[in-house]
Amino acid sequence: VVYDMTSIFGMDFSLGPVFDAIQNYGSLIFIVLSGICVTLGRHNIKRGLVVVGAGGIITGVTYLMVHLQMLSKYAKIDFGILSCLGVCMIVYSLFKDANKWLVLACGAVFIALGFYVGSVRFDHDYLFFLGLRSRYYAAGDYFPLLPNLGYFLVGAFIGKTAYKKKRTLIPAVNDKNPIVRFFGFLGRQSLWIYLIHQPLAYGVLYLIFNIL
């Protein structure tokens, strides 16, 4: 919602350093947590394809909005967080049975490569999904594989280490408690909630700023 208000509808305000920290580092934590979770689940390729498909839907919608002049071309989404995570899930299938230290080493290499390519600008954007882009490239949500695949694999290393017995480290809770059940439901439907919340937020704000 804050992104929509500031980047799309042009409002100028800040929620302070705490929000700025969440905005800057929240996605990194999310990617690492996703890497941890991938070590606990099965059918990661299938899940990855679903997430990539969801990312593709978001890309298609933003391009349509740009075409309809409802969104700036600089706010389009080519390779957002869902596309990145989906590809990471699929790539992880290559590391599923690998030694955890190899996973960590590859993660460190990808992170280092990410910092390098992020400091270089190229003459084209053909490999933007890897992080190789020109100085003119801009997107509303951009998470290239380098260095984010590295952060994902660091999470996988943590998962292989802390959850090698596939048992939760969180104290048991009463799963019949309505509050617990509610948050459990949100967790199971998180992908669809993520897909729906942005169009709803944009629609409400568009109504407020352009019609009311």
Image (spheres, grey):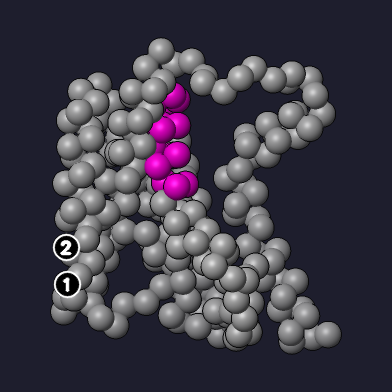
Q: On the picture, is 163 further left or further right than 200?
A: left
Visible residue check, residue 52: no
Residue 38 covered by magenta stretch? yes
Q: Position of residue 79 (x, y in %)?
A: 38, 61
Visible residue check, residue 91: yes
Magenta region: which residues?
Answer: 29-45
Residue 51 covered by magenta stretch? no
Q: Position of residue 51 (x, y in %)?
A: 46, 45
User: What number of labels is visible?
Assistant: 2
- Relative height, residue 184 to residue 56 (above, below): above
Instruction: Give the labeled residue for mark 1.
Output: 120
Instruction: Give the labeled residue for mark 2.
Output: 116
Q: Position of residue 207 (x, y in %)?
A: 77, 78
As helix, strand or loop, the secondary structure at mark 1 comes to loop
Which amino acid type is marked by label 1?
Val
Q: CB of mark 2 within 8 Å of CB of mark 1?
A: yes
- Label 1 CA crowd tier, 10 Å (few <14, some 14–19, many 20+): few
- Label 2 CA crowd tier, 10 Å (few <14, some 14–19, many 20+): some
Which amino acid type is marked by label 2?
Tyr
Q: Quadrant of residue 19?
A: bottom right
Residue reaching furthest front?
17
- Relative height, residue 182 to residue 20 (above, below): above
- Out of 22 and 117, give the one closest to the viewer: 22
Query: What secondary structure characterizes most of the magenta part?
Result: helix
Residue reaching furthest top?
165
Query: Where, quadrant-wise, is the C terminus in this rendering?
Result: bottom right
As helix, strand or loop, the secondary structure at mark 2 comes to helix
- Relative height, residue 43 to residue 201 (above, below): above
Residue at image point 64% right, 17% down = 172
